[in-house]
Image (spheres, rainbow, N blue to C red):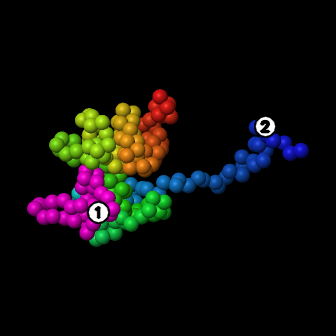
Amino acid sequence: MVQQYFDKEQLKDLVAISDFKGFQPVSTDSYSDGEILKTIMAKGGMKILLFCAIQTAVVGSGNKVFGEFIMNGETINVKTIYKEFDVRDDLSLQSKIDPGELTPRRLQRFYRVQINEYLLQNPHIAPYLWKKYSTLNEEFRAITFPGAESLVANKEEGLYLLETYKTLDNRLELNIAERIRRVLLARGIITIKDIVE
């Protein structure tokens, strides 16, 4: 009869610790601020891509429609800028992309500090995520936008953002909150205990 459970020593003896030499896990997170910066610098679009990120973080996007913004009296179409700077807006949820490739979501994440600063300086501007899916607590308005999961600094902000995404998921039958939860846990902003309570 085959033994059902092995004890610690039996399992430990299966592979020697010395066999771990040369082994290194590789992260599945392909995002890199440094690689994104390198791509943006090579293309020369630092400010215009920031404005696109603010536009989509504040107004949102849907069905590959990203809207437009006005800069110095000129109307700028975000989709046109995305084409010019090779921003990939044609990806599915499971698409594999290189660390330096630009997407609308990655731009929001990369420019998270500037988006937050823009919202702090413009208290009359309400990002769509906060306006449509949150409890409208003004204290959290400037940190309730896509990409802010990589910005929030404390448990209260993290939990507010997570609850907002749960509301979005419930209304639109999505599952974005799970990814937000994983980011917040990995960053140490929240703990499993915070979620269970």
Q: How many marks?
A: 2
Which of the 4 image quarters holds residue 140?
top left
Note whether 150 is above or below 71 in the view shown.
above
Q: What residue does disc 2 label? A: 7
Name the mark on residue 114.
none
| Percent of width and height locating residue 97 | 45, 63
Note whether 80 is above or below 32 in the view shown.
below
Foreground of the two, 8 or 81: 81
Q: Earlier in the sequence, mark 1 or mark 2?
A: 2
Note whether 93 is above or below 195 in the view shown.
below
Q: Does any portion of residue 38 appear in the rendered image?
A: no
Residue 102 relative to residue 136: left or right: right
Q: What residue does disc 1 label? A: 65
Q: Amino acid at mark 1?
A: Val
Q: Amino acid at mark 2?
A: Asp
**Residue at position x 52%, y 55% in the image:** 28
Secondary structure at badge 2 equals: loop
Which range is magenta?
52-81
Note whether 86 is above or below 70 in the view shown.
below
Q: Residue furthest top?
A: 197
Q: Residue furthest left?
A: 73
Foreground of the two, 14 or 171: 171
Is 184 part of what is drawn in magenta? Answer: no
Disc 1 crowd, CA 10 A, few/some/many (<14, 14-19, 20+): few
| Percent of width and height locating residue 124 | 16, 43
Secondary structure at badge 1 equals: loop
**Residue at position x 42%, y 64% in the image:** 91
Residue 139 relative to residue 17: left or right: left
